[in-house]
Image (spheres, rainbow, N blue to C red):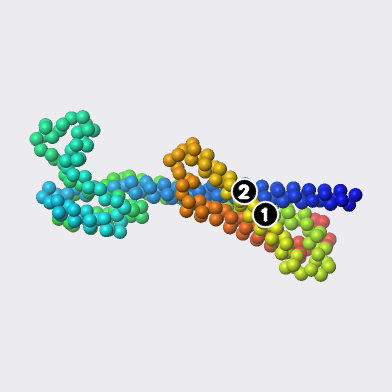
Amino acid sequence: MSKTFEKHQKKRLQSSYLSVIVSIALVLFLVGLLGIIVLKTQALAQHFREQVTLNIFLSDDANVNQIANYKKELQKKEYTQKVEFVSKEDAAELMQKEIGQDFLEFLGTNPLKNVINIHLKSDFVTAEKMKEIEKSLVKNKIVHEITYDKPLIELLNKNIKRISVWILIFSGLLTLIAVVLINSSIRLSVYSKRFTIKTMQMVGATKSFIRRPFIWTSIKLGILGALLAIIALIGMGYYIEKQIPEIKILNNIEMLLIVFGGVLVLGVLITWLSTFFATRRFLNLRTNELYY
């Protein structure tokens, strides 16, 4: 009879642990997925910003040496991501291919100018900073004109800020929900052992001694839940890459390490804190209050 009862209790305990692990894994999976979206959004925002070009049209009297020196000077600037030089001959050839006509034969001369295109680093792609860059560059005597798509930059930055704010709000809400759900699962697990806690306390065990095995068990459950969440995230990343190869989630090792590390730390931290406060509550209860 006692053996049957022990088996029954063991099964209940294992079932309780399994439900806690699954709950933790599901919640941490959602948090990790959101983390990937947040970091990938930043990477995409940086990518789109770095596609914005600042076009420097050069004067016709600028010679080859002046252009080469100016290009080297631009490459050393703190805001420069990449520098491209397009000669007026190359520009004319590209235009001929686009319009399908030899406009040089019609005009007699090439009206286009040599141009240096600068791809800026993402931090400098703002309306204010680009105005400052334009003011400093236009002072050079070989510069004829500087152009860039001002409405596009304003729209790009506006949309990035708007998306970032909503993602931040959603991240905060989901993290709060994650904490509440994991905390509830841990509290229920500790609640099922409240009589054991009180019995240990009555025979003279200290609070820290009673609390220690509960915290250690919960931390192990948190680690197992986090590992399951990480495996699920890898599977999700593989599936997304298979459907949309351009996203390249699994190739970004640094991003994955940040997300997986965050999931593991969150799993351990929440389970540890939840167990600490749950056990403290039952340790402070009187015996007759355990039935409510």
Is residue 150 visible to us here? no
Q: Residue at x 23, y 33 (%)?
A: 98
Tell me: residue 24, above or below residue 212: above
Q: What is the number of the mark on residue 280?
A: none
Categorize mark 2 by other alpha carbons within 10 Å: few (<14), some (14-19), many (20+).
some
Tell me the amino acid under the disc marked 2. Answer: Leu
Horizontally, residue 39 falls left or right of residue 184, namely: left
Is residue 103 visible to us here? yes
Tell me the amino acid under the disc marked 1. Answer: Leu
Horizontally, residue 20 falls left or right of residue 52, namely: right
Tell me: residue 225, above or below residue 88: below
Badge 1 element: helix
* N-terminal label among 2 and 1: 1
Q: Residue at x 90, y 49 (%)?
A: 1
Residue at which label 1 appears: 221
Horizontally, residue 46 falls left or right of residue 5, namely: left
Q: What is the number of the mark on residue 228?
A: 2
Name the residue nearer the viewer: 215 or 122.
215
Name the residue nearer the viewer: 197 or 21.
21
* Horizontal and vertical percent position of residue 206: 76, 69
Q: Residue at x 72, y 51 (%)?
A: 17
Name the residue nearer the viewer: 165 or 36.
36
Badge 2 element: helix
Tell me: residue 109, above or below residue 78: above
